[in-house]
Amino acid sequence: MKYTKSGFTLIELLAVVLIIAILTSIAVPQYRRSVQRAQAMEMMTNLRTLFDSAKRYRTANSEAPLKLTGLDVSFFDATTPDASSFNIGNFHYSFMNDGISACLLSNRNTFYNTYCFKMYYTYTSGSKKYKDLMVCSSMAPKYNWLCEALSTSRLDGMNVIGS
């Protein structure tokens, strides 16, 4: 009886597993960065929408809005729209007299160790006055790359988005 060898050797299987491991170690960090950048863009879009609506509110009422209700936008998943701060998805938004801030929530519903965007109605730096200024700040070194990638310039130690 003639025996024919079929199948793969252990060395061949180990080589395939090693190649898959190397490709995975390259792809997973890039995928995470893409997800983080997409989250940041979602937050920036929501923040810009809120900010534009808040500017219209300020024009009509001569004061800054301090809650989501009363604005001409709505978010179906906003928690506590009658409060000065609320969540939309994975982000926490807060109204202030000088602008609106948005921070990524961590898995414990806090924004410690994440990053934030803030839009100012007006911001004064020395003798210069800026309108509609958006800045990014990271509260963890692992997000510094994100603020630097999205910023176009720096002002008073802040990463400025656009200008």
Image (tube, rainbow, N blue to C red):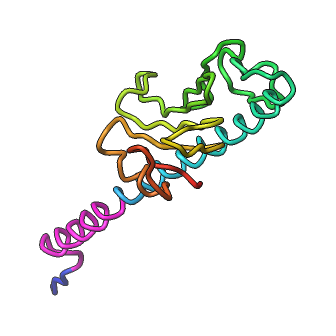
Q: Which residue: 62% across, 30% down?
A: 99
Tell me residue 146's x, y (percent).
Answer: 42, 51
Q: Compare residues 72 and 156 and report the one nearer the observer.
A: 156
Count of numbered marks: 0
Q: Is residue 26 magenta?
A: yes
Compared across the picture, whether 24 is left or right of 44 comes to left
Q: Which residue: 23% across, 66% down?
A: 17
**Outermost residue toward the bottom?**
2
Q: Quadrant of residue 91?
A: top right
Q: Compare residues 18 and 132 and report the one nearer the observer.
A: 132
Compared across the picture, whether 50 is left or right of 130 comes to right
Tell me residue 44's x, y (percent).
Answer: 60, 44
Quarter occupied by the N terminus: bottom left
Tell me residue 89's x, y (percent).
Answer: 60, 31
Quarter occupied by the C terminus: bottom right
Q: Is residue 32 magenta?
A: no
Give the vertical position of 153 relative to 67 (above or below).
Answer: below
Q: Which residue: 76% across, 34% down?
A: 55
Q: Compare residues 1 and 104 and report the one nearer the observer.
A: 104
Tell me residue 79's x, y (percent).
Answer: 65, 19
**Outermost residue toward the front?**
127
Compared across the picture, whether 59 is left or right of 112 comes to right
Give the vertical position of 45 relative to 100 (above or below).
Answer: below
Give the vertical position of 23 relative to 87 (above or below).
Answer: below
**Outermost residue toward the right?**
60
Q: Which residue: 55% across, 46% down?
A: 128
What secondary structure is the magenta-colored segment mainly? helix
Magenta residues span: 6-27
